[in-house]
Image (cartoon, rainbow, N blue to C red):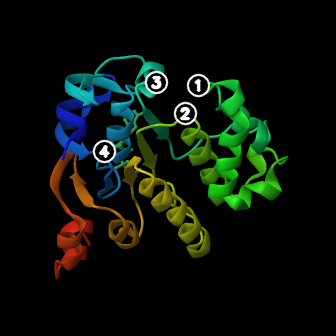
Amino acid sequence: MTALLTIDNLVAGYGKLPVLHGISLQVNEGRMVAIIGPNGAGKTTLTRSVMNLVNVMSGRVSFAGQEITGLPTQEIARCGIGFVPQTRNVFGSLSVQENLEMSCTPLPRARHRSAIDAVYDRFPRLVARRSQAGRSLSGGERQMLAIGSALLAEPRMLILDEPVTGLSPHLTDEVSRGIAAIKETGVTVIWVVEENPQQVIALSDEVAVMQTGTIALQKPSAEILAADNFRELFLGV
Ligand SMILES: Nc1ncnc2c1ncn2[C@@H]1O[C@H](COP(=O)(O)OP(=O)(O)OP(=O)(O)O)[C@@H](O)[C@H]1O
């Protein structure tokens, strides 16, 4: 299987302070990888370092065979990586429809309408909220809009930072089903998980466990779920 994303010995952090201490991770095309680990382990920093949004001090990131370390974030996105941060991921003053129109810019104009309709098909809850301002959406609706917006650039890989954290069980199911369906279309997914990772692990192919700025373990999901001491080993509880 081909590696779509390869992170090699990455050291990154904020200012001069490294938070990631030599991370190596490989994500194969078409797979879904869950990144789990306790608060402060560096999960968000890892996603941000792929997009060159934190200070990358050493190491390499390659995507689809091309080194992307140090490229401007916009250029990394243009290589085919869609990044959905946990917060501030939609334009609050714009309506749902306007948010989606804004995100269509990489596509030829003639395709905007059908591409936006495909997002509404993927997340039907957004249809009735078409004219509603981004800032007035519920947490789950906002995640749906943010993920839908990222899809409009037709990424080969989506990086989702805690897309279901804080959502009700019902909305968690709805967003999770949407993400699983996106993966079924061939998009590679990195899904950072904070709470209740069992459900996400069950949807994922692999799990990477982070601990204090390192990847302590990367394993197929089935093996992790089968471990008797799953909670103790992988969640630190
Ligand atoms: N902007 C920042 N400036 C300085 N240090 C930061 C900054 N953002 C995060 N850190 C530190 O980096 C470390 C890793 O944080 P990060 O947010 O990546 O962890 P996380 O695993 O995503 O945690 P959580 O699950 O709580 O979101 C923490 O010690 C945090 O305090």
- Ligand 1 is within 8 Å of the C-beta of the residue at disc 1: no
Amino acid, disc 1: Pro
List x then y, in percent, for residue 14: 34, 28
Q: Earlier in the sequence, mark 2 or mark 1?
A: 1
The residue nearer to you, when weighing 212 against 152, is 152
Provide the secondary structure element on which disc 1 rests: loop
Amino acid, disc 2: Ala
Label 1: how many residues lie within 10 Å, few (<14), some (14-19) or many (20+)? few
Are dots 4 and 3 in contact, CB under 8 Å? no
Q: Relative to 118, does residue 152 appear above or below in the rendering?
A: above
- Ligand 1 is within 8 Å of the C-beta of the residue at disc 4: yes
Residue that badge 3 annotates: 78
Q: CA distance from mark 1 to mark 3?
A: 9 Å
Are dots 2 and 1 in contact, CB under 8 Å? yes
Residue 221 shows which numbered tag? none
Residue at 81% over, 49% down: 130
Are dots 1 and 3 in contact, CB under 8 Å? yes
Q: Residue furthest front?
A: 110
Q: Earlier in the sequence, mark 4 or mark 3?
A: 4
Q: CA distance from mark 1 to mark 4?
A: 31 Å
Q: Nearer the viewer, mark 4 or mark 2?
A: 2
Amino acid, disc 4: Gly
Indicate which quadrant contains ligand 1. top left
Q: Nearer the viewer, mark 1 or mark 4?
A: 1
List x then y, in percent, for residue 211: 21, 53
Residue that badge 4 annotates: 42
Provide the secondary structure element on which disc 2 rests: loop
Residue that badge 1 annotates: 106
Residue 139 can be seen in this image: no
Q: State the image quarter where residue 70 is shown.
A: top left
Residue at 71% over, 28% down: 110
